Image (cartoon, rainbow, N blue to C red):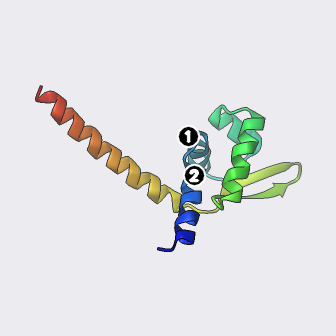
Amino acid sequence: MTPELLALIADRFKVLAEPARLQILQALRAGDRSVSDLARATGLGQANLSKHLKSLYDGGFVDRHREGLFVIYTLADADVFRICDLMCGRLEELSTQRRKLLARR
C-alpha cells in the first residue's frame, strides 16, 4: 500500500476512534433519525452531537437530508458495522483468553 492510501485509511479510523461517534452510528443502525432523535438516543448535547455528526458526514459514514425544519441523518456506509462486529469478536476472544489465564492462578 502506498503512503497516501495508508493515510486515507488512518483518517477513516480516526473518525471511528471516538466512542460518541460509534454511539451515533449505533443509533442510526435502527434507521434514519433527526438530530433531536439522536440527542435523545445518545444523551449527547446538541452542540457536541452536531460536531460529531459533521465528522461522520465529512468522513462519509453518514448522509443527511432536510425534511421540513428537520435535518435527518442516515447511514451512508453500513459496512462500518462489519468492522465493529470483527472488533467485538476479537474482544470476546481476548476476554475469554484472559478469563482462562486468571482461572489458572
Position of residue 68 in the picture relative to residue 74 (left or right): right
Residue type at mark 2: give it: Lys
Residue 98, which numbered label?
A: none
101 to 21, vertically: above or below: above
Tell which circle, 1 or 2, labels the residue nearer the N-terminal end.
2
Residue type at mark 1: give it: Pro
Q: Residue at x 52, y 58 (%)?
A: 80
Q: Quadrant of the C terminus?
A: top left
Residue at the left extreme?
104
41 to 8, vertically: above or below: above
Q: Residue at x 14, y 28 (%)?
A: 103
Q: Residue at x 64, y 37 (%)?
A: 41
Residue at the top extreme?
105
Q: Residues within 10 Å of mark 1 (few under 14, many from 20)?
A: few
Q: Position of residue 75 (x, y in %)?
A: 63, 58
Give the distance between the C-alpha atoms of the residues marked 1 and 2, in whole angstroms.
Answer: 11 Å
Position of residue 96 in the picture relative to residue 16 (left or right): left
Q: Position of residue 31 (x, y in %)?
A: 63, 52
Secondary structure beneath label 2: helix
- The foreground one among 38 and 54 is 54
- The foreground one among 46 and 51 is 51
Residue at the right extreme?
69
Secondary structure beneath label 1: helix
Residue 40: quarter of image: top right
Q: Position of residue 38 (x, y in %)?
A: 69, 41
Residue 14, which numbered label?
A: 2
Res. 30 in view: no
Residue 19, which numbered label?
A: 1
Res. 4 in view: yes
Q: Position of residue 33 (x, y in %)?
A: 70, 48
Observer-side mark, 1 or 2, equals 2
